[in-house]
């Protein structure tokens, strides 16, 4: 101890006494991450967006997903749906097969399809026919009590109904208003949009798929990836607008066109055209900037006896990456084609289109008597990057995803046991993680909570509106 | 219906892809030109078509006003 | 754009009259042999840029077809059709739908790990005001038969974590 008690020496403090000791006492990084992110223990942590209230007058996936991101991070979201009908997305399900019930008291045999999944979690569901003059007051009162709104209507629709940004900013100058239009304003402002329209119109579908010379056609992604992608981009806009509002106290209007959003992920396509007049073409499962860096077809399936065609026929693809010179040399050694290495010693030589055609053909030739897992094992044992192309069953059974909580079972309070992936695959925050309270709720399930408990309308009024199908 | 009698596959393809424009480009005799076909309202750019070879697998827009007289990848179409 | 092969081959005294559709995705630029979905006659075709360049030329019996049409029908006979995936007639595709993909919602009460899931109808009404729903599914009260079945499953050890 020092004589002067105000003096503090590191030797007297509890804990490590030196830098070396500190390093020794630190837990391994893996353990640290496990403790910091603790999948499955999200509910005990605070929510970063708690206190934000957002209105969602949205449909389908694109605009709902912009709000879903907020709801997963703790914002209180009020989803406003059409009375007795709900979001049209509720009525879509793959091949009309998978539904959860109930949807609404007046529609006992209708359910909500899995197509609705992940787009509107953790939200309060009210119904309102807000274009009626009689419901304007309730709508405006919600605006006054909310931080923002996302809508997805055609250009000028909300303006015609006197609830666009021009009107609501007079009620609430801090209001952040998102118009997620299909085309946005401009010469093509006529229509709405769908994901496939976005992929096509933005130029993305034209560079997806196999090259024309290989018999390919432009291809859309199987899932509605541009809906999810552009919805997420809106969320960034909202967070930036909220930061701006914290500084200035003023709201913003965000205009977001789905058909242009996908243009952002086109990479080198546009500057290449601008510089040389080159039109980018499709290049299938290979890469335009790296080689070897693509997906190859192996000869044998990993599950030849499975009844599932995805297993039986398609468990044959493997992703291979060996674009560094040393890696490529090793790869050519493994496939016993030293000539291949001597022909393409430098990456600059490999990455050319003709070279790629040659290299991948030889790789597939080597793999034609091997199964996918054999290819993966051989290449991984040699220290090369190689992973099987997995289907969703394999993702479900993958220990890596299970430990990280990416795919997990959740007992929804209303609908029971559901396997979920959306919330927990969007990045983990150690202090304020995303979480999933409920996947969705029936149409108008929270009418009483919002109209009566929050806005203070008497129950008789709520019942009257309900009977008139205004809510 | 395009009459295929007596045409080679290449000649047949040329009939299918009847070009919008005429010019002095040697590209018209080249295997690798993919012309803008007749009646196209798209693309709006002033091009006669695309060269499929120079930047293969990407396509290069062959401008209408820069008349190509010789080219290192030129190949007489068959 | 989609070309067809209208098969006029005589089958048991009358023409086959089957329209075999050549879907552009497969046949846009294509050369080979293809069978008629009804009578199995093999035709050789050569298509360029979506147009028929050569054919359809009938091949001698016993020729093995390279592929089959995606779909075929008989418009003169009340549109009898051959949907895709009929073995030996139309082109098989690998991802044949599972037998339950019939366009009819499949009623399930339990998920694949054996826990209850509200996948059947009709469900009891909300019993709230103005369609209000409570926050919890009181399974024991609302669906006692599912609850009972669930207890049996637990007893039999059919309820798993994954």
Image (tube, coloured by chain):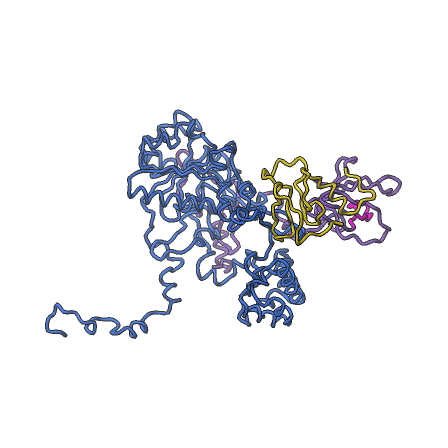
Q: Which chain shows up in purple?
A: C
The residue at the far top in this view is A133
Front residue of this view, candidates B65 and A376: B65
* Residue A299 counted in the magenta span: no
Front residue of this view, candidates A445 and C141: A445
Which region of the structure is painted magenta?
Answer: C33-44
Q: Which chain shows up in blue?
A: A
Q: For the point 67% across and 67% down, which residue is it? A: A369
Q: Quadrant of residue B11?
A: top right
Q: Relative to A27, is B71 above or below?
A: above
Q: For the point 29% across and 43% down, which residue is it? A: A246
Q: Position of residue A250 (x, y in %)?
A: 31, 38
Q: Quadrant of residue A298?
A: bottom right
Q: For the point 61% across and 47% down, which residue is it? A: A218
Q: For the point 50% across and 60% down, which residue is it? A: C157
Display colour for chain B: yellow
> Would residue A283 be found to the left or right of residue A401 on screen?
right
In the rendered image, which quarter contains the N terminus of chain C? top right
């Amino acid at each position: 101890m020092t004589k002067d008690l105000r003096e503090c020496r590191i030797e007297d403090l509890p804990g490590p006494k030196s830098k070396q000791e500190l390093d020794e006492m630190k837990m391994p990084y893996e353990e640290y991450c496990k403790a910091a992110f603790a999948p499955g223990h999200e509910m005990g942590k605070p929510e970063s967006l708690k206190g934000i209230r957002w209105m969602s007058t949205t449909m389908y996936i694109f605009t709902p997903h912009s709000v879903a991101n907020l709801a997963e991070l703790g914002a209180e979201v009020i989803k406003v749906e059409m009375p007795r009908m709900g979001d049209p997305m509720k009525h879509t399900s793959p091949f009309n097969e998978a539904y959860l019930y109930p949807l609404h008291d007046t529609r006992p045999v209708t359910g909500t399809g899995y197509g609705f999944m992940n787009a509107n979690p953790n939200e309060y569901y009210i119904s309102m026919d807000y274009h009626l003059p009689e419901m304007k007051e309730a709508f405006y009162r919600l605006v006054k009590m909310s931080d923002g709104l996302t809508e997805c209507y055609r250009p000028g629709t909300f303006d015609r109904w006197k609830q666009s940004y021009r009107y609501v900013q007079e009620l609430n100058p801090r209001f952040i208003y998102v118009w997620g239009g299909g085309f946005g304003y401009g010469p093509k402002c006529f229509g709405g949009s769908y994901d496939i329209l976005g992929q096509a119109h933005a130029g993305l579908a034209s560079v997806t798929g196999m090259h024309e010379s290989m018999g390919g056609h432009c291809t859309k992604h199987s899932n509605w990836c541009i809906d999810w992608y552009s919805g997420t981009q809106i969320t960034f806009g909202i967070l930036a607008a909220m930061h701006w509002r914290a500084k200035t106290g003023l709201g913003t209007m965000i205009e977001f066109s789905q058909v242009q959003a996908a243009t952002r992920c086109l990479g080198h396509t546009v500057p290449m055209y601008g510089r040389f007049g080159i039109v980018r073409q499709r290049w299938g499962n290979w890469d335009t900037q790296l080689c070897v860096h693509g997906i190859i077809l192996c000869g044998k399936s990993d599950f030849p006896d499975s009844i599932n065609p995805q297993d039986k026929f398609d468990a044959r693809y493997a992703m291979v990456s060996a674009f560094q010179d040393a890696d490529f040399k090793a790869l050519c050694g493994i496939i016993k084609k030293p000539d291949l290495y001597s022909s393409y010693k430098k990456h600059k030589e490999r990455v050319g289109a003709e070279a790629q055609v040659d290299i991948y053909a030889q790789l597939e030739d080597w793999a034609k008597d091997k199964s996918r897992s054999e290819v993966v094992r051989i290449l991984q044992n040699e220290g090369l990057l190689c992973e099987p192309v997995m289907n969703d069953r394999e993702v479900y059974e993958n220990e890596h995803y299970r430990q990280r909580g990416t795919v997990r079972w959740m007992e929804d309070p209303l609908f029971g046991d559901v396997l979920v992936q959306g919330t927990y695959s969007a990045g983990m925050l150690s202090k304020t993680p995303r979480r999933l309270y409920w996947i969705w709720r029936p149409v108008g399930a929270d009418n009483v909570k919002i109209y009566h408990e929050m806005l203070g309308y008497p129950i008789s009024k709520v019942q009257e509106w309900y009977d008139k199908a205004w809510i | 219906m395009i009459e295929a009698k007596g045409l080679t596959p290449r000649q047949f393809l040329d009939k299918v892809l009847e070009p919008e424009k005429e010019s002095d480009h040697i590209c018209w005799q080249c295997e690798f030109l993919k012309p803008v076909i007749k009646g196209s309202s798209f693309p709006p750019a002033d091009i006669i078509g695309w060269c499929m070879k120079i930047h293969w697998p990407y396509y290069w827009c062959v401008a209408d006003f820069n008349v190509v007289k010789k080219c290192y990848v030129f190949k007489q179409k068959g | 754009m989609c070309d067809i092969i209208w098969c006029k081959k005589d089958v048991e005294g009358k023409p086959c009259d089957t329209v075999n559709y050549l879907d552009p995705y497969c046949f846009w630029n294509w050369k080979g042999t293809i069978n008629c979905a009804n009578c199995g006659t093999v035709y050789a075709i050569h298509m360029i840029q979506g147009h028929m360049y050569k054919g359809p030329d009938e091949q001698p019996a016993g020729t093995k077809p390279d592929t089959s049409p995606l779909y075929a029908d008989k418009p003169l006979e009340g549109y009898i059709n051959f949907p895709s995936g009929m073995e030996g007639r139309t082109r098989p595709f690998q991802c044949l739908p599972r037998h339950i993909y019939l366009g009819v919602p499949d009623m399930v009460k339990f998920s694949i790990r054996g826990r209850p899931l509200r996948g059947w109808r009709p469900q009891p009404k909300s019993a709230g005001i103005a369609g209000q729903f409570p926050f919890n599914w009181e399974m024991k009260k609302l669906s006692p038969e599912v609850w009972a079945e669930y207890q049996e499953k637990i007893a039999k050890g059919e309820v798993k974590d994954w």
